[in-house]
């Protein structure tokens, strides 16, 4: 697996973690509605699995997963996928959603490469 990780400075780490997880958990509930401009391309909505607490979150998509952890003053986000294209896809997905959620006080998301892991 390839990984990338971001440590995002914020005093509202838990708030953003929960907001992001709730957003993706609700994706499957909009099946009868007109697709939104930010709908996930090529992702069957019933294939998005989301678990979270106030301090930890997990998003599973067909092309990888994202783990989130709320720490004091920091939101830690780690994406994992089988190839670089899907790592970048997850990075873009998380970054664009966090940018939209933090318009009043924009978050700065800078990705670093994590160590390769084998599962």
Image (cartoon, rainbow, N blue to C red):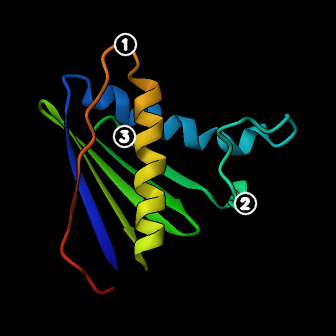
When asked about the image quadrant of residue 3, the answer is bottom left
Q: Secondary structure at mark 3?
A: loop
Percent x, y of residue 9: 17, 32
Residue at the image position 55 percent from the left and 35 percent from the top: 23
User: Residue under circle 1?
Assistant: 104
Residue at the image position 68 percent from the left and 43 percent from the top: 39
Quadrant location, the C terminus: bottom left
Q: What is the number of callouts on the image? A: 3
When asked about the image quadrant of residue 35, the answer is top right
Residue situated in front as seen by the camera: 80 or 57: 80
User: Residue under circle 2?
Assistant: 44
Percent x, y of residue 30: 77, 37
Upstream in sequence: badge 1 or badge 3: 3
Specify few, some or many for label 2: CA neighbours under 10 Å numbering under 14, 14-19, or 20 or more.
Answer: few
Between the residue at mark 1 and the residue at mark 3, the CA separation in whole angstroms equals: 24 Å
Taking 63 as reference, is 30 above or below it?
Answer: above
User: Residue under circle 3?
Assistant: 53
Residue at the image position 57 percent from the left and 43 percent from the top: 24
Upstream in sequence: badge 3 or badge 2: 2
Specify few, some or many for label 3: CA neighbours under 10 Å numbering under 14, 14-19, or 20 or more.
Answer: few
Residue 83 got which mark? none
When asked about the image quadrant of residue 16, the answer is top left
Percent x, y of residue 18: 41, 33
Residue situated in front as seen by the camera: 68 or 34: 34
Q: Secondary structure at mark 1?
A: loop
Residue at the image position 25 percent from the left and 81 percent from the top: 117
Q: Secondary structure at mark 2?
A: loop
Q: Does the residue at mark 3 contact the one at mark 2 (Cβ under 8 Å)?
A: no
Percent x, y of residue 13: 26, 31
Q: Which is more foreground, mark 3 or mark 2?
A: 2
Between the residue at mark 2 and the residue at mark 1, the CA separation in whole angstroms equals: 31 Å
Q: Along the horizontal axis of the image, is 48 left or right of 32?
A: left
């Amino acid at each position: 697996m390839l990984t990338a990780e971001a440590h995002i400075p914020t005093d509202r780490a838990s708030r953003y973690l929960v907001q992001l997880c709730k957003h993706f958990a609700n994706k499957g509930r909009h099946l009868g509605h007109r697709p939104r401009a930010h709908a996930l391309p090529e992702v069957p909505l019933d294939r998005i699995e989301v678990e979270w607490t106030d301090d930890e979150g997990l998003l599973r998509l067909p092309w990888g997963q994202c783990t989130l952890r709320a720490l004091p003053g920091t939101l830690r986000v780690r994406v994992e996928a089988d190839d670089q294209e899907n790592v970048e896809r997850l990075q873009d997905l998380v970054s664009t959603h966090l940018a939209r959620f933090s318009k009043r006080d924009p978050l700065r998301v800078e990705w670093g490469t994590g160590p390769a892991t084998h599962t």
